[in-house]
Amino acid sequence: MRTHVTNFDLRLRRRSLLGYTFGTAAYALIIVVLYPAFKSSTSLNDLVKSSSTAAALFGITGSITSPAGWLNANLYGNFLPLIMLLITIGYGASSLAGQDEEGTLSLAATLPMSRRRILGEKVVALVVQAFVLAVANMACMFVGRGFQLTIPFAHLLGATVGVALLGVDFGLAAMALGSWTGSRGAALGVASSLAAASYLVSSLAPVIHWMHPARFASLFYWSVGDAQLSRGLNVGSLGVLVAVGACSFALALWAFNRLDLH
Amino acid sequence: MNSVMVADGLTKTFGPHRGVTDLGFEVQRGEVFGFLGPNGAGKSTTIRMFLGLVRPTAGHAVLFGQDVEHAPTSILARVGYLPGELALHPRLTGSQHIEFAARVRGLEDRAMLDQLVERFGVIVDRPVRTLSKGYRQKIGIVLAFMHDPELLVLDEPTSGLDPLMQDEFQRLVREKVAEGKSVFLSSHELDEVQRVVDRVAIIKDGALVVIDTVEGLRRSAPRTIEFRFARDADAERFRELPEVRVVNVEAKRITLVLHGPVAPVLRVALDFEPIDVVARPADLDELFLTYYRPQGAEIGDGAR
């Protein structure tokens, strides 16, 4: 399999990817190390229970002092998806529309390779970036075993895959929007807005009755919002995330094949 | 099949006043074809359709006998493209760009690549952002020529190059033509084109206005003739002549711009006892500017 475009784009993104990954890993380690200090804090749980709607806004549901609750409240429910989306939506918007606006996309597009291949290799670069961040974060969780923070491996793996696919799906959406509009700004803005709406729906659905059915429309629900750290990523959720990614890829390919390049 | 490049009713519409309309031309194998026009005339749009970057609204862009819109992208392996405004990734080096293109092209013989780097003094080991426009353009020359393509599509290729490098580039183009390669050379500068091309197409406001050889254009280019007479001359007699425009009349002195043969003018002039005549040679620049000027501005305006 030829991966020249993938390698080229990963080289372009290397610094920012490493920066985000090390920064997030450092934050994750702090969360892990702090866990024993909060593990037995009943007042913290009481606070969350008494302000469940406010807590939900920060992605916190259920017990915050259990290992899964602690990690979900401080990392997997909010911070990690946020960083993940910064990376993947940023790349999705810049890899096609952004490079076209700069004029650099024609470097690849005037070489003997199809747009399908260009897009396919860029999607591989997107997937690599998402999994580098997610797996680095998962590696930090193994340190948690020394700090009474133990999550079953299968659950941790499920949440890792879930958060990576969340990023891939929104990155693909940004690619599709960028190919459709030809505008990096539009791709960035619309994909970010969709992600924010998705986050709000998934977070508030458990505490706001009328929003409850809407959670199924949120990718956050299928990736990190359905207690994946406690129960793992089920096949249905995995299927939804993969299917949404496949649809976004098809849309991106359709739009990219029709995009006039600079 | 001798045509390597054919535009057949090629049209691209971006808006009411932008794009190109119904272009038709052929570039023969081994030919250097000049594509001239002012900025914004539609030269780059035309080129982008041939490279598959832009889809035509109507008509066909044909390379090596295949419609670009439906041809496999492997057809681009036979083409080298050099844009005038070459966009490179600022943080990457020249060699990283060149290596990327070489790998995608599956380039095994790197002799041409190494020769080009040496010949043009290309700086390959520094980030592109630290290089001047001329040095970035040299990287573009390597990218366009390194695989020894059958067809070179050059869009304002010498922009940013110093005069020495411009000469070297012209030599390179002539060498490629001598080897039987075809060249499509787009420019807004007559000088850049007339030294190397066989035929020229001039595009204005998205439409072709003329296609001819340089010699053919020169034959039809306007000549300026200035007469000094022994007695007052009747300018009306000259105005009545076809293909003649009187641009200046002073006492016993008349200046004309002539598009056709000179004999009718001389016959009229003899009636007024000419004592001196100054004729400027066929002015290709003037012809070229005629096509460039907005409609309404006429030949000879610049001579007044």
Image (cartoon, coloured by chain):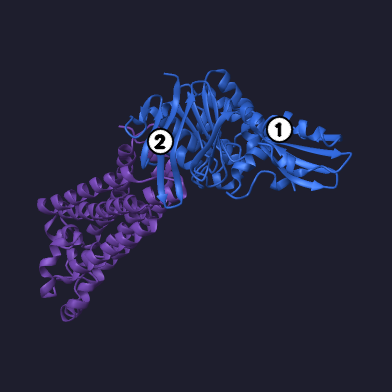
Using the numbered discs, state the Cα–Cα distance from disc 2 to disc 1 in whole angstroms: 32 Å
What residue is at 32 percent from the left and 32 percent from the top? B70
Q: Chain of mark 2?
A: B
- Residue B96 is tagged as none
Mark 2, secondary structure of its residue: strand
Left or right of residue B275: residue B2: left
Percent across and percent down for residue A101 are 44, 51
Could you tell me the amino acid type at mark 1?
Ala
Circle 1 residue: B282
Residue B92: tell me if it is visible: yes
Image colour assigned to chain B: blue
Circle 2 residue: B9
Mark 1, secondary structure of its residue: loop
Q: Quadrant of residue A104?
A: top left
Q: Which of the two discs, 2 and 1, labels the residue nearer the N terminus?
A: 2
* Picture mark count: 2
Percent across and percent down for residue B63 are 41, 28
Is residue A74 positioned above or below B216 on the image? below
Tell me if mark 2 has few (under 14), some (14-19) or many (20+) residues whose alpha carbon lies within 10 angstroms of its own: some
What residue is at 39 percent from the left and 37 percent from the top? B52
- Residue furthest toward the bottom? A50
Q: Chain of mark 1?
A: B
Q: Using the image as rendered, state which of residue A75 and residue A195 is in the foreground.
A: A195
Q: Please say if the residues under marks 2 and 1 sit with CB atoms less than 8 Å apart.
A: no
Could you tell me the amino acid type at mark 2?
Gly
Left or right of residue A174: residue B26: right
Chain drawn purple in the picture? A
Q: Using the image as rendered, state which of residue A52 and residue B249 is in the foreground.
A: B249
Is residue A162 positioned above or below B256 on the image? below
Tell me the quadrant of the picture where the N terminus of chain B can be found.
top left
Percent across and percent down for residue B110 are 50, 24
